[in-house]
Amino acid sequence: MIKKLEDLVEKAQKQKKMKLAVAVAQDKDILISVAEAQRMGIIHAILIGDKDKILTISDELNIELDGAEIVDVLDIAEAAAKAVKMVSEGKADFLMKGSVDTSILLKAVLDKEFGLRTGRLLSHIMLYEMSNYHKLLFLTDGGMNIQPDLEAKKTIIKNAIIAAKALGNPEVKIACLAAKEKVSKKMQATVDGAELKQAAQEGLFGVGVTVEGPIAFDLAVSKAAAEIKGYTSPVVGETDIILVPTIEVGNGIGKALTYMASAKSAGVIMGAKVPVVLTSRADSSETKLYSIALGSVITANQRNI
């Protein structure tokens, strides 16, 4: 079981090298992280975008791109489509968002003719490493689904379980976040949390998955808080995945972890045929490197490589 992001990078290095298609690659931090991932033997990079800009950036920053394939496509939408098509055609293993709006890239991902649709809902997951938590923590969905209903939450959980199991988690513990633990029809998050817990007990999410809900954040991550409040659950203080009720909650928790708790992180979109590495423009090249490693490990696990 992987407990540190550096261990995730090591796992990615030890497995088969994946081909990564980067959509609109003319971005400083993207090129830094992609070049480092390639240097470390994690990926073979396929850079789709404005070739002149890619080479200019790499020259100015002395970024080593030897071995990378550059596909010259000037139009941003066409570059995004080309990257998706390369994955769809088996010329690349997974996908990364470069200097392109998420909506443009996802339009290509969901294209009925050449896209990577599976019929499942797409959802965003973030993976955090914090000094005061004893293992890695997934958070979903603070990036895509605004206010998911019960059925959407079921798929979001399934997507996150795939990612968690790729990291070697033999058991996956999930906390369905709410403001309190008692079910109230006035608070939909509590109703959904209880429903999801019941669904897990009935086997919806497979063997080795425990879902608790509704549950507040402090109980999900702190055994001490649970002891004080007299709350018992196998998920308490052992949570692997936090399911948030709305995008605002996920966005707020995630940014608080990054900016107030100095958490390291990685992020991908799940639900397509392959993981889509997607990070914020404000994220560091380190976060982008960890995200590439996460996408690579999930891809290899899905293919049993």
Image: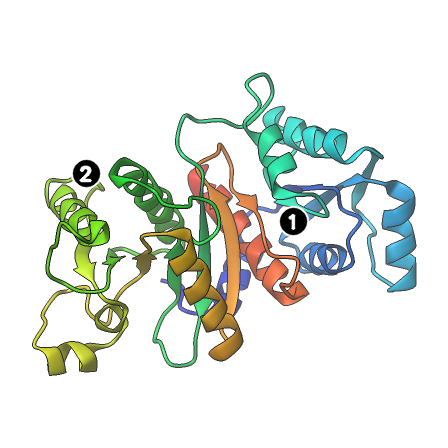
Dot 1: element: strand
Is residue 210 positioned above or below 115 on the image?
below
Which of marks 2 and 1 precedes in the sequence? Answer: 1
Task: Name the spot of residue 283 as percent of width and height, x first.
Answer: 62, 63
Q: Which residue is mark 2?
A: 204
Give the class, few, some or many, for how many residues have Cα within 10 Å of label 1's Cα (few <14, many ≥20). many
* In this rendering, the label closer to the viewer, 1 or 2: 2
Task: Name the spot of residue 164 as percent of width and height, x first.
Answer: 36, 53
Cβ atoms at labels 1 and 2 below 8 Å apart: no
The three-letter amino acid code for the residue at tag 1 is Ile
**Residue at the location (51% across, 49% down)?**
268
Residue 76 sits in quarter: top right
Task: Name the spot of residue 145 as percent of width and height, x first.
Answer: 42, 44
Q: Which residue is mark 1?
A: 43
Quadrant (top left/top right/bottom left/bottom right) for the N terminus: bottom left
**Residue at the location (16% across, 49% down)?**
191
